[in-house]
Image (cartoon, grey):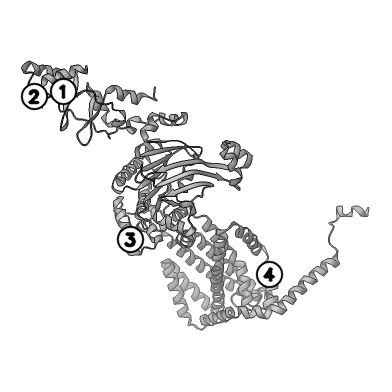
Amino acid sequence: MPEPLISIQGLYKVFGNAPQTVMEAVKAGKSKDAILADSGHTVGLKDINLDINKGEIYVIMGLSGSGKSTLIRHFNRLIDPTEGRLMVDGVDVMSLSASELESFRRNKMSMVFQRFGLMPHRTVLENIGYGLGIKGVEKEKRDATAYEWLETVGLAGYEKQYPAQLSGGQQQRVGLARALCTDAEILLMDEAFSALDPLIRSEMQDQLIELQQKLHKTIIFITHDLDEALRLGDRIAILKDGELVQEGAPEEILLTPANDYVEAFVKDVNRARALTVETVMKPAAHRITADTIGEALEQMKKFKGDYGYYVNEDGYQGVILQDSLENAMENDADTALCEKIYENVESLSPDTVLEVVIPETLDTDYPLPVVDEDGDLQGQLSRASLVEVLSVGHG
Amino acid sequence: MSDASWLTEFPQMDRADLLTIRKTLDGAYREFSRSYGDAIETFFNPLLMFLVWFEKLLLASPWWAIIAIITILAYTATRSIKLSLGVIISFSLIGYFGMWDNTMRTMSIILVCTFLSIALGIPIGIMMARSNRVQSIVTPILDVMQTMPAFVYLIPVVMLLGIGKVPGVIAVIIYAIPPVIRLTNLGIRLVDPEVLEAATAYGANKSQRLWGVQMPLAMPTIMAGINQTIMMALAMVVIASMIGVKGLGQPVLKSITNQYFTLGLLNGLAIVALAIIFDRVSQAYALRSQRHLKGGHNA
């Protein structure tokens, strides 16, 4: 396991006049409401521990008031914790002086905001180059770099416009370009797409995924939308009332919710869109490796089914049905298996979301084979397992 | 019952005591102005020299040059032909009715007062915006400056510096500076916190935040403050003329004492004309410099 890029240990944040005085009560497990009633202090975050690896999209999700926006502001110390450790790339961020912190923010992290946070008095190009300007990069070079990112996010031609002249989606593209322009390794995205309407939001999600495939940034993404979290996240942390309730890969969260809270959350998720074939498929038992029709039929009889997946040393070849084998037997049992006998059924890729494969799966009488990029048979997806996973939580 | 007289009559301070207090304070202040008056006057000497020089410059320049310069300034600031024509017409009328010299004197003192108010007011406003403590100290002082009748603070100023240009400038600034301070403070405090947070998140330091984000975004509000300051300075010229500030205020003062209605009206109208020109030019300039705030797609 490689060293995580970002590591947060025992992070607490209490808002109020004298946060230190209530820390004992917080640690003793006194409830948020009781502390607020007794001392007027609000517990923002409670004992947060998390590790974020280089190159992953780490989604922190929770409802409003769960502390997610507070948490993301700790990564670049826009908010200082009451207690806790924050390590980024081996640097203890809490120990940085004011000027070291400025240089840390200039070079290590950039941020995208929910309401964009663009400078209304600067043009789009000047906004994108803002981070470079702060670093002291000269104007010519800054503009050239900014223009590249402007093109990348698909806003070429808008460079001289002011933010107020753009639509919400376009403004957030500027926000994204501004964040990417500083070439920071870590991208903080605070509900970056929440203010956009659904169609634009899903477009932006696609763009982010596409960019991430090229750039391999480490992205910390805050959202209140579980569908968005499941779509973007390599790993997801769920926050409730300032506490980390569950952390894991999207399918773990979906299929094994840690408690009632997460379960209630997960209930309304469109699983067909959130889960991939890989998470639902079963191991492919009906594997036929025989050379001739006779042997193949024997193999098929052993695993008591009327179909099988023909696999040779080149990987998956096709599906063989019992009927066609028996028909072929009548001619000659020693004939080698050839293309005429097995059907060249379109296989599924393990990364496809379920939604896409529903029609094919339902149209076919036997489970569809799942084959990876190398052509190896990975598993099978049956109607039954598809129906089972899609109906849980709705039953 | 004499014991209950405090119920019907306010239990006021003994007259003799009050007199002593007044005498002591007046004496102390007189003592102060006697011992430090000269030093303070020397301190303000450069300002006086500048005021005299600037007034002489305006008076000595040919009238057509002044009109040309003001018209060009008005046009570059507003790009409005109508306003530029208005400038030419009003200044021509002012000159035709024999008020040119007084108008130049008033203009010189107003420009200096406005400049000083901005130079002092904006930094004070910035400090107020940065610290709640400074704000809580400065706000009541501004309240006093704005509500205290001008004549009251004219007294100590005149006692200290005598009558003339410098006390006039000080009195005008005391009266006119509060709007620019208040609106600088307000403008900076109203800057969208998310924009400021974005600047911080990208590693901007204090001065990069102030000059790159806060001041430009507060500019419309600050410009409104500057505009108010100019208007108030103009309104003060009549009162300032009581302590020897020459200009359009003096004929007005003369007309009050001698009941010259037309003289008062003409000079009053000249002040109004100056006020309208300053107001329109500064407002149009502010608007033009804030074009980005207008929304709408014009791609």
Q: Mark 2 vs mark 3: which is more N-terminal?
A: 3
* Callout 4 secondary element: helix
**CA–CA distance in space, label 4 to label 2:** 114 Å
Three-letter amino acid code at the position of disc 1: Ile
Three-letter amino acid code at the position of disc 4: Tyr
**CA–CA distance in space, label 1 to label 4:** 105 Å
Q: Dot 3: within a 10 Å radius of its alpha carbon, few (fewer than 14), some, or many (20 or more) residues?
A: many
- The residue lying at 5 percent from left, 17 percent from top is A331
For disc 1, the marked residue is A320
Q: Mark 1 vs mark 2: which is more N-terminal?
A: 1
**CA–CA distance in space, label 3 to label 1:** 61 Å
For disc 3, the marked residue is A143
Q: Residue furthest bottom?
A: B60
Three-letter amino acid code at the position of disc 3: Asp
Q: Residue furthest right?
A: B1
For disc 4, the marked residue is B153
User: Is mark 4 in CB contact (under 8 Å) with mark 3?
Assistant: no
Q: Quadrant of the C terminus of chain B?
A: bottom left
